Image (spheres, rainbow, N blue to C red):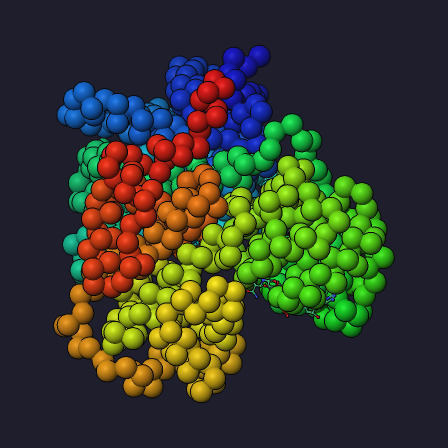
Amino acid sequence: MSTYTNFTLETDADGIALVTWDMPGKSMNVFTAEVMEELNAIIDATTADASVKGVVFTSGKSSFSGGADLSMIKSMFSSYQEEKAKSPEKAVQTLFGLVGRMSGLFRKLETSGKPWVSAINGTCMGGAFELSLACHGRVASNAKSVKIALPEVKVGIFPGAGGTQRVPRLANAQDALQMMTTGQSLSGSRAKAMNLVHQVVEPDQLIPAAKQMIKDGLKPVAPWDEKGFKLPGGGIWTPASAQLWPAAPAILRRETSGNYPAALAILKCVYEGLQVPFDTGLKIEQRYFTEVLQTREAFSMIRSLFISMQELGKGARRPAGIPKTELKHVGVVGAGFMGASIAYVTAAAGISVTLIDRDMEAAAKGKAVSEGLVKDAIGKGRLTQDEAAALLSRITPSGDYADLANVGLVIEAVFEDREVKKAVIDAVEAVLPEGAIFASNTSTLPITGLARNSKRPADFIGIHFFSPVEKMMLTEVILGTETGDRALAVALDYVAAIKKTPIVVNDTRGFFVNRCVLRYMSESYDMLIEGVPPAMIENAAKMAGMPVGPLALNDEVAIDLSLKILKAAVADLGEKAIDPRHMELISRMVEKEGRFGRKNSKGFYDYPPKPAKKSLWPDLKSFYPQKKAEEVDVNVLKQRFLVTIALEAARTVEEGIVTDPREADVGSILGFGFAPYTGGALSYIDGMGAKAFVDLAERLAETYGDHFKPTPLLRDLAAKGETFYGRFDPYAGTKAAA
Ligand code: NAD
């Protein structure tokens, strides 16, 4: 009988203990304080038991483990902050101690004197792979689901339980750095090629192979604990390393613009750690980890990119008391650019789709997009032939609205035209079953206005996808004034089923994401007009942490669409709604120069046939007298981009469009890549403090225009020393209920 909650332990006739990690009530194993305690007890028990010859460690779930439970780290942040207020020195010491626990536990396993083999049956991330690295043998299944990674850098931290020391003692330093500074996933065979696992076997051979390693006399000693251990490639002081190390910080800077302290800490851990004995290396890692945990970047990234994202994904904004809807059948109307891809992601989630367009031919053309995507996925090994066939069989093209009689949800993605949409709403509602929900994928038309065409406005909602739909993880769910709770619940159940992250926003022109994105692009128009060289504009944005420069982004979105949006703003809101110089610039690009963006290979960039790369259109410089590079302060350019977006995000909160700061943060990162190291547009403000932000915005307003003027809400937060997360506390309801 097992005495553990999270593990079972069975010893076979050969004296090999099989430890199976299977946390009750969880879909994935994660490290919690209890798991660590139990693992410690298991190490003690197996070490003390003379009949145990060795230990095989595996998972009872389809995945191996997702690594540390980051909410454990979140509670570490709070206790650190509390203690810091009393005694900063003691707080750091306590943090240092806590940080060392996992590393110490794995080192204890590694030096227990019994051979341990990790049998990796599925996704093995972060701390779970660090545990595996501390085992003396590692066997991975060759299943497609096996993904091995140390992805901590993506949430602002790094592998702090021995990862930075063990990986470069097994793999060559360059591969080790690449793996840890990007957080990339490895297949079992790639991990084997890097010398990070010993064997890759068929899934059903995993445990036998792991046991066999022990029977074959696996030594319970890590390579670095052996006398005469040699580092792969010979260590730091070799000619090969002389090629790598001087360039490494420069390459990292090129990739990250110095915005990610954790990535730099990885470099330091490896460089310093490889020059000292292993245990000293672990201490170095522990010190840098303690330092990185105290950074604003780590705090904000863990909060937004892990905790908030998970909470929103699990339905943090889902109204209570409405039973979960398991959608079996969804209708998509409009099989064009967006509708075709929406059908694909829906079918990929196992849901049947009726894909409607004006006629069968147009609908079939939409389905052909899925055929292309499926082919691509087969080529990349992401789908088997059978899975691909099943996916395609779930999409039924049609030109007949009557085929929507059994659907639980319809997503409309027809032309962005009120009249066309009105006709579609009428046609769909004529056949839509009672209780089914109608969702529009409109990107600019307010939902409340569209819902006026509906006979059942409570069942009418916006589900706004982003392109490319298969890649973008975000969806914006938009509430019209009459949208009911059930429509919201169904929309969120659907978004969860297709494994995207939702943010829920109230109705407004441009919703949340496009409002912010327009500010980003509009700031770049101002800069062009001022004569800032286009390359500086693009580079400054990237240095600020944006993944794509504003001009490149505008090309992706299409410049003729920008012109349409400017014209619509004038038509709906009057001449004052826009800057006439922007209209002049954009209409010149589209109407005079015929430059529509990537779609006609001519935009702010030129797009020559592949493999040649895009380059900025040289004539753009002739539009305005150009400033010399030394006349432009790159830091100010960087600030302008982040501040103008953050101000727009703050306005959406002030207007009640976004009600939960988590959504503005997650939406800004997943929607348009807002400098992830900040934790998102509102965390950027909270991080520097509302007062500092208001001062900065005021300074920018003096030179660059009133759109930088801080809003009343920001002034109020600044005056009272408050934050967005304090004033609009997303957990207020839960705390009151607790
Ligand atoms: P699109 O022109 O590529 O596709 C529209 C499709 O709707 C066409 O296949 C057309 O034949 C079909 N259609 C038109 N009238 C119809 C009718 N009466 N019945 C059935 N089908 C009809 O347009 P798109 O880019 O896919 O945009 C569709 C919607 O998605 C728009 O509301 C747009 O604002 C929104 N949207 C677009 C993007 C984007 O990046 N393109 C992003 C988010 C949202």
Residue located 58% across and 35% down the image: 318
Give the percent coordinates (x, y) of residue 28.
53, 33
Dividing the picture into quadrants, the one containing residue 340 is bottom right
Q: Is residue 406 above or below residue 635?
A: above
Residue 529 position, x and y percent, is 29, 75
Q: Tally the numbered discs.
A: 0
Q: Position of residue 162 (x, y in %)?
A: 31, 36
In this orientation, does residue 149 appear? no
Seen from the viewer's position, the closer of residues 233 and 639 is: 639
The residue located at (51%, 52%) in the rendering is 508
Q: Is residue 123 above or below residue 574?
A: above
Q: Residue 451: where, in percent of width, then height?
A: 67, 52
The residue that appears at 42% across and 65% down in the rendered structure is 577
In the rendered view, does 685 fall on the left or right side of 456? left
Nearer the observer, 485 or 128 = 485
Q: Is residue 58 left or right of residue 417?
A: left
- 541 above or below 429? below
